[in-house]
Structure formats: C-alpha cells, structure tokens
Amino acid sequence: MSKLIVNSYEEFEQHIGQILGISEYIKITQEQINKFAEATLDHQWIHVDEKRAAIESPYKSTIAHGYLTLSLLPYLWSQILEVNNTIMLVNYGIEKLKFLQPVLVNNELRVIAKLASIINLRGVTKAEIKITLEIKGNKKPAMDANVLFLYHFK
C-alpha cells in the first residue's frame, strides 16, 4: 500500500471509518531490546537474559518491552500518512491502550491504521486513529490503541 497524502481537514475528513493504510513490517531484534532496556533502565530478565528466557520463560525466548513496541508507532505511522499544509503536529494522547500479546525477539510487526474520528476544534484538527499492531503470522495482535493527534493546518 502506498502512503496516503492529506492536504486539508476536508481531505482528511473523507476517510472517517476507513483504513488509512498498513505499514511495512519491522523486525524486533535483541539489540533493539537491549538498547531500550539501557535507555529506560528496565533490565528485567524476560527482556535481556536470552539464556534464562530460553529455560524459564513460557515463551522460550526474550520478549520486547511493551513500551518498546509502543515507541515504534511514530516510525510506522510515518509510512502510512503524510499530512501537508500544517504548521505543527502534536501527539495529544493514547486511549484504550492494550498490550494483547507479547512480542518475541525476531517477531515482525506492522501497524494497521483506521481513522476513527476527526473534529475541527476552532482551527485545530483532532484526529483519533485506531491502531492495531500486528505480529506477522499471528492472529492475535500485539497491541490495540486509539492514538490522538492534533494537526494545525495553515
């Protein structure tokens, strides 16, 4: 799927209830997990101790931090939508965030994004995007959330 390009509130509004796009897959590596552990000071063994996880974990593998998977959203979102003619974009919030399934090292993830709602707040566009983070080859997603953005169109 190619990137959707939106140039105005009116163009954005035409996509309410529709899937905006699907990102490419990204592979979660142990190196990424280790770097995230360093950055966040979260060194829980289930994430960083490969030998122990292989023996003691019910998954027989290390798993990515939930917040690591969440932090990939801006990168994956940028593959789906390009909004032009804006002065500023603000990450406004996340609602109904659920980590539904662990992401094992070497799993591949992608985002499916659907425009749940859009409203004009005195010139600022508030967009609610239903995000599903899929794991390649799994029926159950890793995460669901409603992500809120504020777009300040020119």
Image (cartoon, rainbow, N blue to C red):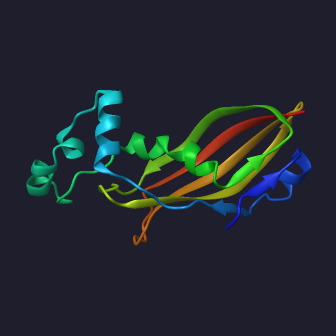
In the picture, the quarter occupied by the N terminus is bottom right
Describe residue 114's horizontal placement relative to residue 48 as left or right: right
Task: Residue 66: give x, y in percent of width and height.
Answer: 38, 44
Task: Residue 20: give x, y in percent of width and height.
Answer: 71, 60
Viewer-closest of 128 and 109? 109
Q: Residue at x 49, y 45 (%)?
A: 72
Q: Please tell me whether residue 35 is drawn above or below residue 20 in the rendered image.
A: above
In the picture, the quarter occupied by the C terminus is top right
Viewer-closest of 79 and 142? 79
Q: Residue at x 54, y 46 (%)?
A: 73
Task: Residue 74: give x, y in percent of width and height.
Answer: 58, 43
State the count of labels: 0
Task: Single out the residue that lies furthest toward the front.
Answer: 31
Describe residue 73's horizontal placement relative to residue 52 as left or right: right
Q: Please tell me whether residue 90 is drawn above or below residue 6 in the rendered image.
A: above
Describe residue 1's horizontal placement relative to residue 43 as left or right: right
Toward which corner of the image does residue 32 lie, by quadrant? top left
Viewer-closest of 12 and 26? 26
Task: Residue 47: give x, y in percent of width and height.
Answer: 24, 44
Describe residue 129's horizontal placement relative to residue 11 as left or right: left
Q: Residue at x 91, y 50 (%)?
A: 10
Q: Please tell me whether residue 17 is drawn above or below residue 66 in the rendered image.
A: below
